Amino acid sequence: MSRSYFIPEQALVDPVTIDPTICVGCNLCVYVCPADLFLPNAQKQHAPIVMYPAECWFERSCVDICPEPGAIVLNRRSCQHETLVHSLHAAFPVNCA
């Protein structure tokens, strides 16, 4: 019997990316994230640690509060199901009347 292995896309493994070359280590994302994904880095002025990436809600508070544009990127490929759901609703509208 052969085994099958699934290698997930990077976005499924790492839905939130912090670019350490852009991040100034202000930790505002740590305090604003409702899902508590981030931990402050023990080294001052370094990017926070994305501790629980699977818990990301993709609600963008970390991106919105970040003073450095592009420092935090939400890899939306892990939410491809949203596109599928919108396509299905468009193709098969529900009439509740």
Image (cartoon, helix red, strand yellow):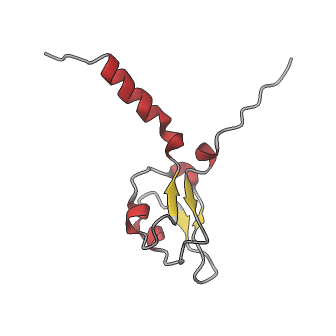
Q: Which of 28 and 55 is in front in this view?
A: 28
How many numbered marks have been drawn onto this rendered protein structure?
0
Q: In this view, does 45 lie above or below 92?
A: below
Looking at the rendered image, the quarter that the N terminus falls into is top right
Q: Nearer the viewer, residue 18 or 1?
A: 18
Residue name at image x 18 percent, y 17 percent: 96
Q: Residue furthest right?
A: 1
Where in the figure is residue 8, as x and y percent of width and height? 66, 38
Relative to 73, 61 lies left or right:
left
Residue name at image x 57 percent, y 58 percent: 17
Q: Residue furthest bottom?
A: 44
Q: Is residue 74 above or below residue 83?
A: below
Looking at the rendered image, the quarter that the C terminus falls into is top left
Residue name at image x 59 percent, y 46 percent: 11
Where in the figure is residue 81, as x and y percent of width and height? 47, 32
Residue name at image x 55 percent, y 71 percent: 22
In which image quadrant can residue 42 be found?
Answer: bottom right
Where in the figure is residue 72, as x and y percent of width and height? 50, 62
Q: Nearer the viewer, residue 32 or 79?
A: 79
Relative to 87, 19 lies left or right:
right
